[in-house]
Image (cartoon, coloured by chain):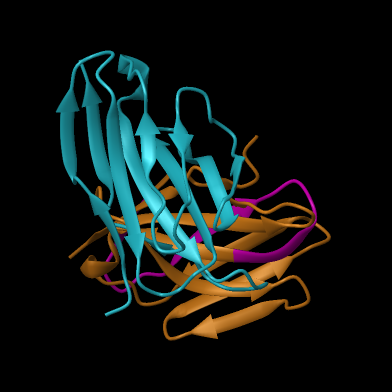
Amino acid sequence: EAQVTQNPRYLITVTGKKLTVTCSQNMNHEYMSWYRQDPGLGLRQIYYSMNVEVTDKGDVPEGYKVSRKEKRNFPLILESPSPNQTSLYFCASSPWTENTEAFFGQGTRLTVV
Amino acid sequence: SQQGEEDPQALSIQEGENATMNCSYKTSINNLQWYRQNSGRGLVHLILIRSNEREKHSGRLRVTLDTSKKSSSLLITASRAADTASYFCATDAWNTDKLIFGTGTRLQVFP
């Protein structure tokens, strides 16, 4: 089954403790991205990647890192999480061609205390 | 900067009625897409309309696009309680590598 898988689904952590949210897709998509969703703000893009070893900042990249060592994986790293990073995070992937849809993971609800 | 803004923010209707949501955006686009999100879950793609298209249908969904006004609308006909969800427009803008989402419309359909 074609899917984007994020882990964990829920995470509560403390300020400053490094964490990684994993994202994997099995559709051989070139393009992957991370979004955060906050009430009243919709989805905002954090980082995106157009292919292996190619990453770029989205609209809200501060406090986050990503890597794209393999085509299927695109982990999101919070080196020193802070309470303002409490949010619902989504990973998405799509083929790198025009006029194609994005496929989303189930989401990771992160709480930083 | 957000590309799409949806209107209304929230909409409540009875089953069987039609639901119309609007989206406005700011710059030239390759296409505009609509997604649905059930509470706290991942987004699911509904329909994509290209910049050279004016209207598209998919089942009970009808999407229009007016590039001169930089706006789109999503019409759900004969709504059902199961249509209760948030709906987002997303634009694939020219000269960017991003899919930019609006703030969404929360639709509540009462049985």
Magenta part of the chain = B11-32
Question: How far across and how far down the image is residue A58, in percent?
Answer: 59, 39
Q: Is residue A51 above or below residue B5?
A: below
- Give the left or right position of residue A44, taking residue B99 as reference: left
Q: Which tint was used for chain B?
A: orange
Q: Is residue A107 above or below residue B19?
A: above
Quarter-of-image position of residue B89: bottom right
Main secondary structure along the magenta-highlighted residues = strand
Q: Look at the image and say whether residue B29 sits in the magenta stretch.
A: yes
Kindly identify the residue that appears in the image at 43 percent across and 49 percent down: B105
Q: Quadrant of the N terminus of chain B?
A: top right
Q: Is residue B110 above or below residue B56?
A: above
Q: Is residue B7 above or below residue B56?
A: above
Question: How far across and how far down the image is residue B98, in percent?
Answer: 63, 52
- Give the left or right position of residue A8, taking residue B73 as reference: left
- Give the left or right position of residue B84, taking residue A14 as reference: right
Quarter-of-image position of residue A25: bottom left
- Give the left or right position of residue A111, taking residue A74 as reference: left
Total numbered circles: 0
> Which one is nearer the viewer's eye here, B60 or A35?
A35
Kindly identify the residue that appears in the image at 37 percent across and 34 percent down: A77
Q: Quadrant of the C terminus of chain B?
A: bottom left
> Which one is nearer the viewer's eye here, A87 or B6?
A87
Residue B22 visible, this angle: no
Kindly identify the residue that appears in the image at 65 percent across and 45 percent down: B3
Question: How far across and how far down the image is residue B9, in percent?
Answer: 45, 43
Residue A84 visible, this angle: yes
Identify the chain drawn in cyan.
A
Instruction: Spot the residue most to the right.
Output: B68
Question: How far across and how far down the image is residue A80, in percent?
Answer: 34, 18
Kindly identify the residue that appears in the image at 30 percent across and 25 percent down: A86
